[in-house]
């Protein structure tokens, strides 16, 4: 009997031992997958299959963005099939709506053809990665809002579930976008879970990425200006647990783990306020790979590295495209030198690798450099104080997504869109982080207005030697002045003493050449939305009526609501709708110039005149709640008490043409800005060049 009992016990133990051995093997496989070389992760947003490829074949899709990566540091591709909205994708699906449109801008969409051929973009990418020994993740945007400005992108699921959105086109919330889904709704979570699970079961991916940076608004409460509640945060954590449990289950079924990656804001308190409890996710082991940053960055890279090491999670620095629109030659935030410097900073801080977002050219030279600090060490670099833009109400500002979200920002914001303004006699410091290159010649470049009396110092040492190079002041850096890591630059404006009229500072542009930085403008679209010189005047033309068809030149002038600020412009209207826009951080207004009248956009004041017969001198003056418009020296619009439209922090003057659905064009011969904000000094950009600069 005793031997029988022992045999029964032994037989009962064998399955448990087998399961334990299987689990050990599974975990060893996970560790091996996590430990593979991952120098550069390239996120492909899937546009190669829907707008870029020249013909509907797998070969054409790969030629657009992938062929050429074989000899680069890109070891991993994160392929996104989300198509601008929730629950519409470019992979085959019985759960989500397949993206089959071939009209308008999607005339080159090859998804229908690939599906008919028995494949789809995600499958094409999986097969290419397997053939070329590359790691492949499927990337899902957790709350894409591109459809907020394009009704034709709203998915059928959203149309069927309007109660699951944070707002509506007629009732837009103050934060995020009305078309984003509310994860407090069970239907949203169930649908997203079903989409993720289907991909895990149907595609041979190494992992999945939940991209919480596209776009970071997840609850109706935060869209309305609140912080995510404890209940909402718990709901989202439960959702991530559910996804992790599913990937483990499916991974065991297929005999190979499915890694889980996330892309998030690089600030634990900001993420928590949005409803993402990073500490809980990482401490519970729900995540294998974490990428930080995107539209904006909140902390030095060392902060992200420390967070990842605290929980033994692989950590990657996201180098997203710049979108600063006033880069000035010879410096560009999109240049090879800039990407080298950005990568060097991240490697110096201790990241596990580099992650590229919205960078789709497989032939960029830096793809063979930025994945190896030793390769980077001897190369020229361009370090900017700030790479990503952060205008008042844009994706690059945390306050766009969450009320007062920028309170947790611990890195500088200094771009031509967001200059540093100094009153006469005032001084300020700006940190700039350097990764390496201290053994090479280095120069500090400062784009500044009223730079004659500006004093510049570095780490407590005044930079006395200077020269002027175009729009820049150049300061050769003494040997040993620059250090790896954080460097503090000090700026001090000249003290104007008893000057009785500190408001008499102006910025002038005349039509001899295109406005140069720190003037900035949107991306030109040939024959659609553009600017060009014609006979001593600047033609600004919007000849398109599709989404994104408009063009403006703007200048950050740091106006004060309690003091007068004005724009003077000589303009000859050709057709349509043209604007002079003034904003002082509190209020904003557009002065519209039509062929037969001028008026105010928000308050509907009007003066009838022929604006096309010749150049006319327009003068727009704002102060307090008042706006006045003069034409050829005569007051034509008196908007006393009517300058009240909220500016949402915007503080600039702009000239340009129309908006997306409208048309407009005019000739601009001169523009003169006057604002007390430019009375002392304005710092528009700060750059450190290490080694001889290469062309942008």
Image (tube, helix red, strand yellow):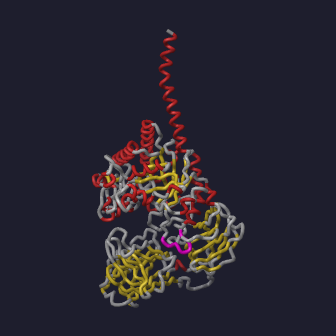
Identified at 48% across, 67% down, the residue is 323
Identified at 54% across, 79% down, the residue is 678
Q: Position of residue 585 (x, y in %)?
A: 46, 72
Quadrant in which residue 525 is drawn:
bottom left
Q: Is residue 485 left or right of residue 573?
A: right
Q: Quadrant of the C terminus?
A: bottom right
Q: Position of residue 333 (x, y in %)?
A: 53, 67
Quadrant in which residue 524 is drawn:
bottom left
Overall secondary structure of the magenta stretch? loop
Q: Is residue 437 above or below residue 571?
A: above
- Whether residue 302 is visible here, answered yes or no, is yes
Q: Is residue 12 above or below residue 342?
A: above
Which of 14 and 154 lies nearest the eye of the viewer?
Answer: 14
Residue at the extreme left:
160
Magenta span: 325-332
Q: Position of residue 350 (x, y in %)?
A: 61, 53
Q: Is residue 487 above or below residue 663?
A: above
């Amino acid at each position: 009997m005793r031997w029988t009992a022992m045999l029964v016990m032994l037989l009962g133990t064998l399955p448990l031992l087998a399961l334990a051995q299987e689990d050990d093997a599974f975990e060893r496989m996970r560790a091996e997958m996590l430990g593979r070389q991952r120098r550069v992760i390239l996120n492909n947003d899937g546009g190669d299959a829907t707008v870029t490829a020249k013909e509907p074949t797998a070969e054409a899709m790969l030629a657009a963005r992938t062929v050429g990566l074989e000899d680069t540091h890109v070891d991993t591709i994160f392929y996104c099939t989300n198509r601008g909205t929730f629950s519409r994708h470019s992979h085959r699906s019985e759960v989500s709506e397949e993206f089959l449109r071939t009209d308008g801008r999607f005339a080159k969409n090859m998804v229908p053809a690939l599906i008919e051929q028995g494949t789809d973009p995600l499958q094409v990418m999986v097969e290419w990665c397997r053939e070329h020994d590359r790691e492949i993740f499927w990337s899902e945007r957790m709350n894409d809002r591109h459809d907020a400005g394009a009704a034709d992108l709203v998915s059928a699921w959203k149309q069927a579930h309007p109660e699951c959105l944070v707002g509506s086109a007629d009732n837009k919330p103050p934060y995020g976008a009305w078309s984003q889904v509310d994860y407090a709704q069970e239907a949203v979570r169930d649908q997203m879970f079903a989409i993720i699970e289907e991909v895990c079961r149907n595609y041979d991916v190494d992992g999945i990425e939940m991209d919480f940076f596209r776009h970071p608004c997840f609850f109706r409460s935060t869209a309305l200006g609140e912080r995510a509640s404890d209940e909402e945060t718990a709901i989202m954590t439960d959702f991530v647990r559910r996804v992790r449990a599913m990937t483990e289950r499916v991974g065991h079924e297929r005999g190979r783990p499915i890694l889980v990656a996330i892309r998030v804001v690089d600030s634990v308190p900001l993420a928590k306020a949005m409803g993402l409890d990073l500490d809980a996710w990482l401490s519970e082991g729900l995540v294998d790979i974490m990428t930080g940053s995107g539209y904006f960055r909140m902390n030095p890279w060392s902060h992200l590295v420390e967070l990842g090491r605290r929980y033994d999670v692989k950590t990657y620095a996201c180098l997203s495209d710049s979108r600063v629109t006033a880069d000035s030659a010879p410096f560009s935030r999109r240049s090879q030198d800039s990407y080298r410097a950005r990568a060097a900073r991240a490697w110096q801080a201790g990241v596990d690798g580099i992650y590229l977002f919205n960078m789709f050219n497989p032939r960029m030279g830096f793809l063979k450099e930025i994945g190896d600090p030793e390769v980077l060490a001897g190369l020229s670099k361009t370090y900017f104080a700030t790479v990503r833009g952060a205008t008042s109400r844009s994706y690059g500002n945390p306050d766009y997504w969450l009320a007062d979200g920028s309170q947790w920002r611990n890195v500088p914001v200094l771009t031509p869109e967001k200059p540093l303004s100094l009153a006469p006699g005032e001084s300020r410091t700006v940190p700039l982080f350097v990764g390496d290159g201290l053994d090479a010649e280095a120069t500090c470049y400062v784009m500044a207005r009223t730079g004659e009396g500006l004093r510049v110092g570095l780490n407590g040492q005044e930079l006395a030697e200077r020269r002027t190079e175009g729009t820049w002041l150049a300061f050769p850096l003494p040997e040993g002045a620059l250090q790896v890591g954080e460097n503090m630059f000090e700026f001090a404006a000249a003290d104007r003493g008893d000057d009785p009229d500190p408001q008499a500072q102006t910025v002038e542009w005349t039509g001899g050449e295109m406005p140069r930085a720190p003037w900035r403008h949107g991306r030109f679209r040939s024959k659609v939305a553009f600017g060009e010189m014609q006979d001593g005047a600047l033609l600004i033309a919007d000849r398109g009526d599709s989404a994104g068809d408009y063009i403006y030149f703007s200048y950050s002038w740091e106006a004060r609501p309690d003091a007068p600020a004005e724009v003077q412009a000589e303009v000859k209207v050709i057709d349509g709708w043209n604007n002079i826009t003034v904003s002082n951080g509190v209020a904003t207004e557009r002065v519209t110039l039509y062929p037969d009248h001028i008026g105010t956009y928000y308050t509907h004041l009007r003066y009838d005149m022929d604006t096309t017969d010749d150049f006319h001198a327009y003068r727009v003056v704002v102060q307090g709640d008042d706006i006045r418009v003069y034409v050829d020296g005569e007051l034509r619009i008196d908007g006393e008490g009517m300058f009240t439209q909220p500016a949402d922090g915007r503080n600039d003057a702009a000239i340009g043409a129309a908006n997306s659905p409208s048309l407009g064009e005019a000739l601009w011969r001169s523009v003169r800005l006057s604002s007390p904000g430019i009375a002392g000094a304005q710092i528009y950009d700060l750059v450190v060049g290490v080694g001889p600069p290469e062309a942008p």
